[in-house]
Image (cartoon, rainbow, N blue to C red):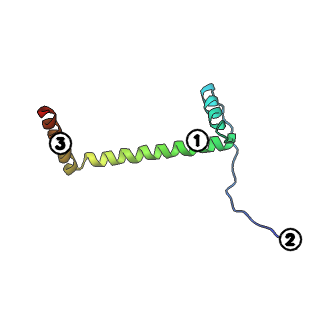
Amino acid sequence: MTDRDTIDRAMSRPISVRLDDDTLAALARLESTGLSRSEAIRTALVQAAGRLDERRALAAEVATLETDEADRAEMAAVAVLMERLRAAG
């Protein structure tokens, strides 16, 4: 009798890229932390995509706040208060 375990993982796909000197230096810095070349590249890609998502979410929040009249009125009131405090000091 043979015991077998099936591991359901997405198959990784090899890709080929050409790296310039700056990118090779950055990769070397990541590898110097103990990451393998593949781990370093995967981590960098996932983090870069996450930062892109964060920037998009922040831009959407700013766009929403720009159309919020109550928020704009509060910002104006705070600006007036800050100017008064600055002038008094």
**Mark 1, secondary structure of its residue:** helix
Residue 4 placed where, x, y %? 80, 68
Q: Residue at x 66, y 31 (%)?
A: 18
Q: Quadrant of residue 6?
A: bottom right
Three-letter amino acid code at disc 1?
A: Ala
Label 1 or label 2, whichever comes before in sequence order: 2
Three-letter amino acid code at disc 3?
A: Ala
From this viewpoint, which residue is outermost toward the bottom? 1
Q: Residue at x 12, y 32 (%)?
A: 87
Q: Quadrant of residue 34?
A: top right
What residue is pinned by disc 2?
A: 2
Nearest the camera: 65 or 25?
25
Three-letter amino acid code at disc 2?
A: Thr
Label 3 or label 1, whichever comes before in sequence order: 1
Residue 76 placed where, x, y %? 17, 42
Residue 76, numbered label:
3
What residue is pinned by disc 1?
A: 44
